[in-house]
Structure formats: C-alpha cells, structure tokens
Image (cartoon, rainbow, N blue to C red):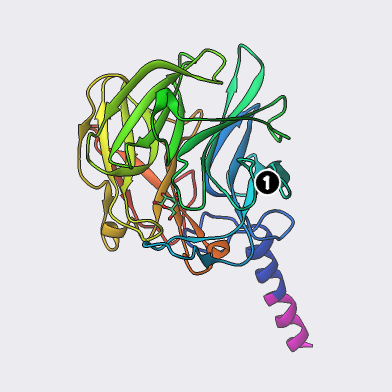
Amino acid sequence: MQRIFSMLWLLIIYMNGYAQQAQIVPGAVWHDTAGNGLNAHGGGILYYNNTYYWYGEIKQGVTWRVPGSTWENYRVNAGGVSCYSSKDLLHWTYNGVALPAEKTDSTADLHISKVIERPKVIYNKKTGKFVMWMHIDSPDYRYARSGVAVSDRPEGPFRYIGSVRPNGNMARDMTIFQDDDGRAYHFYSSEENETMHVCELTDDYLSHTRNDHRILIKRSREAPAVCRYNNRLYLFTSGCSGWTPNAAAYAVADSIMGQWTEHGNPCKGADADSTYHAQTTYVLAVPGRKNCYIFMADRWNKNNLEDSRYVWLPLIFNTAGIPGITWKDQWKITE
Ligand code: GAL
C-alpha cells in the first residue's frame, strides 16, 4: 500500500513538472500544454488582447551539414513558423503553424530546402493586420533577404507576400521593434554581417522607407533584440559565430536613428562569456510591470537542432540604467 502511495506521489510530482511548469527553467526541455516539446526557435513575442503569442522557427527532423560548406552550416528542413499562446508566459498552448513551409515548389522562398529564421510579429493598429518579418535565405546563406507575411488573426495563417533586400542591402539576422508611437523599425545584420542597419518601416509595416541607418559599423554583430527603458533604447546582440555561442554585448541610444553607443556584455557570472551557452533572440518588456524585462535566447544544438533549448532570464536595469543578466536555475516573473 505504501509503495502504491509513493508511486502515486511520484507520478503527481512528475505530471506537475511536465504539464504545469510552475517556473521558467532556462535550458530545460519545455513543453506546451498538450505535453509536446515546444518548437519555436529564434523567436519573438507579440502581446495582443491580454495574451502573449510566441512565434518561432520550427526545427524538426534530421540535422545535417550542408555539403561543401566551409563553415559549420548545420541545418534541418525549414519547417515554417509556429505560434503558441499564453496568459502567463509559462503555460503555452500550441496554435499550429502560423506560416507553413512550401513542400513542392523548390524555387519558393518558403521551400523546405531554404532558410526561414528569426520570425517577429507586430500588430498594425491602422490596418488591423498582423505583420510577420523574417530572415529568408538560400541554404548557403547567399540570398540574404527579409521576408514579410500578413494575417488578420494573431494565430495565422499568415499569407506570404515576398522577400526584399531592404534598400538594396543584404539582410540576415533581424528583429522588429515597435515603438510606443506606433512606428516600427527593422534591425538587420547587413554587409556580410559586418554592419547592423536600422530601417523605419512604412505605416502599414509592409515595406521599408528610405530612413535606413548604418549602426555598429564593422562590428560584426547579429541576433539583435531591442527594448526601451526610461526614454533610452537598448540593443542586445551576439557576435558572429554561427550556432556556437559567444559573448553578448549591448548598445544604447537616445533615439532610434541617433547615435548608438556600444557597451560590453550585460551577462554576469559563470558562463557569461558564452551568454550561458546561448544566443539572443528577443527582449520582452513585460507589459504593465516596471523594470520587468525578459532576455530570451536560444541554446542551439548544432548536431540536433530540434533539441535546441530556450534560455530566458530576467534582465534588470540598475538605477544608472545599466542592464544586467545573471543565470538562474529557475525563476518566476513575479520575482
Ligand atoms: C547564426 C544566426 C542563426 C543562424 C545560424 C546559422 O549566426 O544567428 O540565426 O542563422 O547562424 O549557422
């Protein structure tokens, strides 16, 4: 009897940890509310109608190295973009594939043989549309473009419009930042990943204006993530070393199109020099909370990309406005 009781008890503990993750556990396997592995890499968050939507790359199936590549070009078939939703940033319900990959037309941007990375979605109040921007590339990463898709609902399905080189520039790793005044900006690694660009999008968010600035010139930064804190803007990036992690850095500006001043690594403590074995993807300013930011990163597993993990950590600004990130085995947003 005692044995049955303790087995039941273990089962309860296991189920609780499995389906009802009560805390954020960076680097662990994360599950959705149906108990399936959460598949949303290089992702970003949209907050809409009191709900968080998490969009990310679907990385599923066999990982291989692209033949003839001189660098560690490991990949899986492009799986499209997934969408999960949550009320508390802990329990994520799978909403399905927001933007599917194309299985037959091998010339299409979204063909499974291509690269679909770092999707970011924002809502346009004026048009009532949800707009997704993403990095679109060929398997050898020479295509270097930005793709855009649109939807009437946050869950999708998104309709792919096409891809561009913004103002004729190469574009790889990217993020979209929507400012409080409704203007949206595209940050993208350009010029062979040597120089970051920031470009204002048009009012409908579907194309680029000519307001396109070069920042972090020849600094070779990628994986950009942007937030606003106390009237200043903060841009977090990684160095360029493929799937292998490196040290993050941040830059600060008083206005988006102004001067970006570079600073060092916001990460502290053990493993700070590898961003805790991860790479930036997004910074979430948690709505309705002051000085509550989440630094979101991907812990890539280049040999099995499907098993890449999520490293979410609190990002805290001190009284001088200096951002700091420290490792936590597990944590809660209320802390
Ligand atoms: C990284 C980039 C990832 C992915 C990877 C491919 O530098 O941040 O998004 O493109 O390279 O190796």
In-image side of 284 versus 241 (left or right) = right
Q: Tell me the chief SS of the magenta region.
A: helix
Left or right of 261, for residue 131: right
Q: Nearer the viewer, residue 323 or 192?
A: 192
Position above or below: 128 against 261: above
Label 1 sits on residue: 101
Residue 53 lies in quadrant:
top right
Residue 287 percent coordinates (x, y): 51, 30
> In the rendered view of the protein, which quadrant contains the N terminus?
bottom right
Give the quarter of the image for residue 154. top right
267 to the left or right of 98: left
User: For the residue marked with disc 1, what is the amino acid?
Assistant: Ala
Taking the image as shown, residue 256 lies to the left or right of residue 56, namely left
Write down the region rendered in magenta: 1-10
**Residue 59 sits inside the magenta stretch:** no
Work out whether residue 85 can be spotted.
Answer: yes
Q: Residue 166: percent from the left, percent from the top?
A: 44, 26
Circle 1 packing at 10 Å, graded few (<14), some (14-19), many (20+), is: many
Secondary structure found at label 1: loop
Instruction: Decide if residue 295 is in sight here.
Output: no
Asked whether 41 or 147 is in front, the reply is: 147
Q: Residue at x 70, y 47 (%)?
A: 93
Residue 269: x and y, percent? 26, 59
Q: Residue at x 28, y 27 (%)?
A: 214
Residue appearing at x 72%, y 28% in the figure: 153
Residue 152 rendering spot, x and y as whole percentages: 72, 24
| In the image, residue 211 above or below residue 144 | above
Q: Is residue 4 magenta?
A: yes
Residue 55 lies in quadrant: top right
Relative height, residue 92 to residue 212 (above, below): below
* In front of the other: 230 or 262: 262
